[in-house]
Amino acid sequence: MICTGGTIEKVYSEPDGQVRNLDGKIDRYLSLLRLPDLDIETIRLMNKDSLELTEADRMLILAAVRAKLPRHAPIVITHGTDTMVETGLYLKKNLEGLQVALVMTGAMTPLGFERSDGLQNLTESLLAAQILPPGVYVCMHSRVFAIDRVRKDRELARFVAL
């Protein structure tokens, strides 16, 4: 699992009353799940709102994915939803011959907040990564989309097929 930030990892900052990317919390939530026989390595690459990601950040994500490909294990990337598709398309373009499932997920409401979708999306992404054929996908709200056939619908606050 490669963690890049986004809403799924945001926390409430009391000093300024804002919701921000400050500390990582994916490992804490993974520890709440029953994951027998699943060995998850978590890489904290960055903790940024996806609207703040740069080309250099995407190159860093690509390098992290490439470093893990020799293990032939599926990869889950936590990412902000606003530019998740953009990063996914960048990865697909630069990972020709991908032989594992690469599943991107995030949340519309941060982990730990009431009615957060983060834990559901995280759990479903772990399952999807194990059963999907090689390729790049978005997994959110009990749905899986090929990266080149999905978009975020801001009005509905969910991803929809193209």
Image: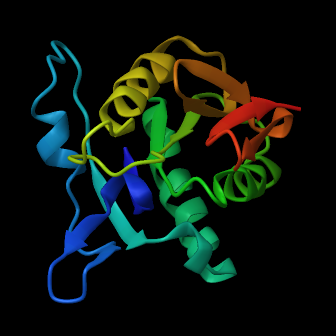
Relative horizontal placement of residue 54, taking residue 141 as reference (left or right): right
The coloring applied to the image is rainbow
Nearer to the camera, 38 or 97:
38
Relative horizontal placement of residue 10, taking residue 67 as reference (left or right): left
Residue farthest bottom in this picture: 15
127 in relation to 139, above or below: above
Nearer to the camera, 18 or 139:
18
**Which residue corresponds to the image point at 65% horizontal and 28% vertical from the top-left?**
99
On the image, the x and y values in percent for residue 26 come to 24, 48
On the image, the x and y values in percent for residue 36 come to 15, 12
Residue 94's quadrant in the figure? Answer: bottom right
**Which residue corresponds to the image point at 62% horizontal and 81% vertical from the top-left?**
56
Which quadrant does the N terminus fall into? top left
133 in relation to 138, above or below: above
On the image, the x and y values in percent for residue 132 come to 60, 15
**Which residue corresponds to the image point at 63% horizontal and 22% vertical from the top-left?**
144
On the image, the x and y values in percent for residue 122 come to 37, 33
Which quadrant does the C terminus fall into? top right
Nearer to the camera, 116 or 41:
116
Relative horizontal placement of residue 145, taking residue 111 as reference (left or right): right
Residue 21's quadrant in the figure? Answer: bottom left
Q: How many marks?
A: 0
**Which residue corresponds to the image point at 52% horizontal and 11% vertical from the top-left?**
131
